[in-house]
């Protein structure tokens, strides 16, 4: 199986080299999409052995992810691991995502920050909880830590996915991918990782109120187009079971020894 790591980066010179070094100990192919950084993020990423794709202007995390994903797929990746560059994710946890992918080969895998959640700032915990509720409703399945940027996407899912919409090329794109996964019945699975908020880290690019409201706006339009999708709400709250997977996915899981 060929796997690539895609790291979107904007002004991450302080941490990018260490993240790449550690990621390459797990997976050799690391692709950094420099999103118009004003510092030497791109130079440090190249010096650390990553392939660097440069965007001349800051286009948002979603646009960076989409470009990196397509670059990886065009070069034969069977799966893409996405990883943030700010030190909140441990590249050493990549094997957890790979193991989950072998178990559920057709589904996106989320590295959910479920361990030591008290380490997260209270406002971030509240905002993430709100996003989890709305995104799970729109996806029609319960999803923990919908705002984690540490994920694995199967190539077959990414080839069917729709890229970021105009005006929604930031953090909302990752939520949109989860909603698309639910609609394709590629229900995301979760592996637990530690919650890490480095005390000396730069301020997060994620703005809890602004970006959460943008996610709610995305979800609201999605729900309105589906008549508010009451079945999805009940499934997200575990009051209704998820529908059976299609025969193609079931067959693949039997062939690989996976479980539903």
Image (tube, rainbow, N blue to C red):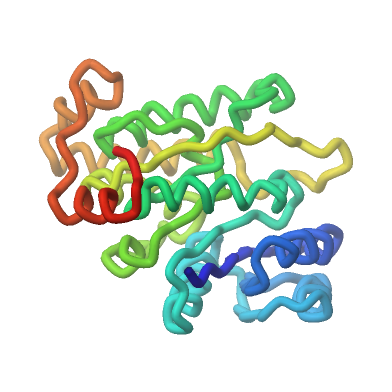
**Foreground residue, 249 or 170?**
249
Residue 16 position in % (x across, y down)? 78, 63
Question: Which residue: 67% across, 80% down?
Answer: 52
- Asked if residue 117 is positioned above or below residue 170 in the image, the reply reads above
148 sits left or right of 20 in the view? left
Q: Which residue is drawn at 26% across and 56% down?
A: 252
Residue lying furthest bottom in this view? 75
Which residue appears farthest toward the top when viewing the image?
239
The reply, left or right, for residue 26 in relation to residue 41 is: left
The residue located at (52%, 72%) in the rendering is: 68
Above or below residue 72? Residue 21 is above
Residue 166 in sight: no
- Quadrant where the C terminus sits is top left
Q: How many marks?
A: 0
Q: Which of 30 and 78 is in front in this view?
A: 78
**What residue lies at 52% left-to-right and 37% top-to-bottom?**
191
Give above or below for 144 relative to 163.
Answer: above
Relative horizontal placement of residue 170, taking residue 186 as reference (left or right) = right
- Image quadrant assignment for residue 135: top left
Q: Can residue 143 be seen in this view?
A: yes
Find residue 208 and report its horizontal and vertical position in percent: 58, 35
Give the left or right position of residue 141, taking residue 90 as reference. left
Above or below 162: residue 123: above
Looking at this view, is 121 or 244 the one in front? Answer: 244
What percent of the width, then of the height, locates residue 128? 53, 30
Please provide percent x and percent y for residue 91: 70, 53
């Amino acid at each position: 199986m060929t796997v690539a790591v895609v790291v979107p980066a904007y002004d991450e010179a302080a941490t990018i080299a260490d993240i790449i070094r550690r990621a390459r100990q797990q997976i050799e192919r690391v692709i950094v999409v420099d999103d118009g950084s004003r510092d030497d993020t791109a130079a440090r990423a190249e010096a650390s052995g990553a392939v660097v794709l440069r965007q001349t202007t800051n286009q948002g995390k979603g646009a960076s992810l989409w470009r990196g994903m397509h670059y990886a797929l065009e070069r034969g990746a069977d799966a893409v691991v996405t990883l943030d560059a700010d030190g909140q994710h441990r590249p050493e946890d990549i094997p957890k995502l790979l193991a989950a992918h072998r178990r559920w080969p057709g589904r996106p895998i989320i590295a959910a920050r479920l361990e030591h959640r008290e380490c997260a700032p209270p406002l971030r915990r509240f905002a993430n909880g709100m996003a989890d509720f709305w995104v799970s409703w729109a996806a029609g399945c319960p999803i923990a830590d919908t705002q984690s940027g540490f994920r694995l996407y199967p190539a077959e899912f990414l080839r069917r996915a729709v890229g970021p919409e105009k005006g929604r090329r930031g953090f909302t794109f990752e939520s949109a991918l989860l909603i698309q996964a639910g609609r394709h019945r590629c229900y995301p699975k979760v592996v637990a990782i530690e919650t890490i908020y480095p005390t000396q880290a730069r301020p997060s690019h994620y703005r809890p109120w602004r970006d959460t409201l943008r996610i709610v706006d995305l979800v609201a339009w999605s729900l309105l187009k589906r008549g508010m999708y009451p079945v999805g709400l009940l499934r997200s709250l575990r009051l209704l079971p998820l529908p059976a997977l299609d025969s193609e996915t079931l067959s693949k899981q039997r062939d690989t020894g996976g479980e539903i």
